[in-house]
Image: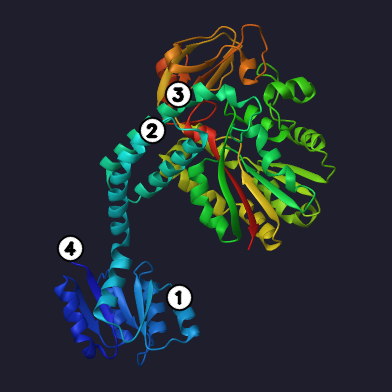
Amino acid sequence: MDTRILWADDEIDLLKPHILFLEQKGYKVDTINNGSDAVDLVKENNYDIIFLDENMPGLSGLETLARIKAIKQSIPIIMITKSEEEHIMEEAIGGQISDYLIKPVNPNQILLSLKKNLKTKDLVSQKNTTDYQIQFRQIGMRLNDRLDYDEWSDIYSELVDWEIKLEEADDDSMKDIFDMQKREANTQFCKFIDDNYRDWLDPKEDSPIMSHTLLEKKVMPLIGKEPIFLIVIDNLRVDQWKVLKPLFAEYFNIEQEEQFYSILPTATHYARNALFAGLMPSEIEKKHPQLWSNESDEGGKNMHESDLFKTNLKRHHKDVRMGYHKIIKQDFAKKMVEKFNDLVKNDITVLVYNFVDMLSHARTEMDVIKELADDEAAYRSLTKTWFEHSPLKDMLKKIAAKKIKTFVTTDHGTIKVDTPVKIVGDKSTNTNLRYKVGKALNFDEKDVIVSSDPKDIKLPKENVSSKFVFAKENDFFAYPNNYNYYANYYKNTFQHGGVSLEEMIIPFIEMRGK
């Protein structure tokens, strides 16, 4: 179908060469010499784009713009004017123009503006698809190299960038190729973790920053020197951060953006307690037994994060004023915004937001959330929508206005699972779908990563025969009893606790208000 253009200009006869040029390029152009008739034509016809002269007798360009937008809000309008006065430009931009050209314009300027406003998505999509085809082989070759933890972090970030770019391409075959490569990356990454994870847990210079070392290396040195906010968004993946980043950048200068490794299991009970304590779980159990709950213990497993953080501060000789607030409900989040002036009196304020984690659980249990977050792209989009309308955004605007040093991070990521793996355990076995801990576990070793002695990975050992078993890649555990029911119920849900790029490599951001 030909692109149909409406061009309104009181000197339209002088623009005949431009019109002929566009018609030769295959565009259909309707012309009019005043704003009133332009409005009437918009009511009667469907146009793909409109060129609108700013300075016309009768209805001015700005008045015509407002009337057209009232009829068809989404139609792109290019304002053309002789004037470079700032207030006219501001009014036109405020009226939601798509582009702004200064007379005299030449045909190539017009053509460029058309392509930019009508073809940008297609052109970007085509370029992204072509570029990924070129990079596909290079990424594949890198996956066969002996990558270190920094290189794995880089390659995962690159894959996330391609995943987001390829969303714009209406090419299912290319998306299938990408999904295949991402799965291959996860297969190789799981082997890498199985071979190297245990070695990282003894203090070494060549270990990556992990949950239990993040605050010591990145936050502790600044505590006491200036007020600090630490924002922990539970279950935030790298891809979710990347779609949130432009929204944060409206108010903050992002000074540092990097990734670190969650400990195993990649679950709140372990990873977030380790984050605040600055200790591995077995060390927490040994040094602060009153602050640690094992899998078999009754009650919540993350009830003492504030106290764990206090012990961490004390161990680092930080005698400071600390505030810690876990935000689960919307009303409480709003109260925190109202209490902002009290929060800034602290040397460090920790705010833990649980929404993204709640979203992943709700998607498993609620059909409406499954519909809203049907795939990875929709999951990212829902996270972005939440942030745009959340009290967290209001809080961040206040923090930015005060130019307070702010850190944003998470405890672990999550992965969309699709392949059930059979496992058998007794009644004391935990219920998590991505890791199991127990004394009588039965499974196929080729399907999992096993720690027969939890002490080797610095996890508590409740019984002599206790072992931890981790699901890898996109797998999830299912019991033989009612196997088909649970396999179908949990397939394509977002889970965490196991070994994958999405769960283990997670974001850490340092920023300050503009």
The amino acid type found where label 2 is placed reads Leu
Q: Nearer the viewer, mark 4 or mark 3?
A: 3
Whole-angstrom CA distance, mark 4 to mark 3, is 52 Å
- Residue at image position (59%, 27%) is 200
Question: Residue 320: image x %, image y %?
Answer: 83, 45
Q: Is residue 267 above or below residue 224?
A: above
Question: Residue 113: image x %, image y %?
Answer: 31, 72
Q: Are marks 1 and 3 in contact (CB under 8 Å)?
A: no
Q: Residues within 10 Å of mark 4 (few under 14, many from 20)?
A: few
Closer to the camera, 415 or 31?
A: 415
Query: In the rendering, which numbered label is found on residue 93?
Result: 1
Q: Nearer the viewer, mark 4 or mark 1?
A: 1
Q: Which residue is mark 2?
A: 143
Q: Which residue is mark 4?
A: 1
- Residue at image position (67%, 16%) is 296
Sequence-first disc among 4 and 2? 4
Sequence-first disc among 3 and 2? 2
The amino acid type found where label 1 is placed reads Ile
Whole-angstrom CA distance, mark 1 to mark 2, is 47 Å
- Residue at image position (68%, 12%) is 462
The amino acid type found where label 4 is placed reads Met
The amino acid type found where label 3 is placed reads Lys
Whole-angstrom CA distance, mark 4 to mark 1, is 29 Å
- Residue at image position (48%, 44%) is 239
Sequence-first disc among 4 and 3? 4
Q: Nearer the viewer, mark 1 or mark 3?
A: 3
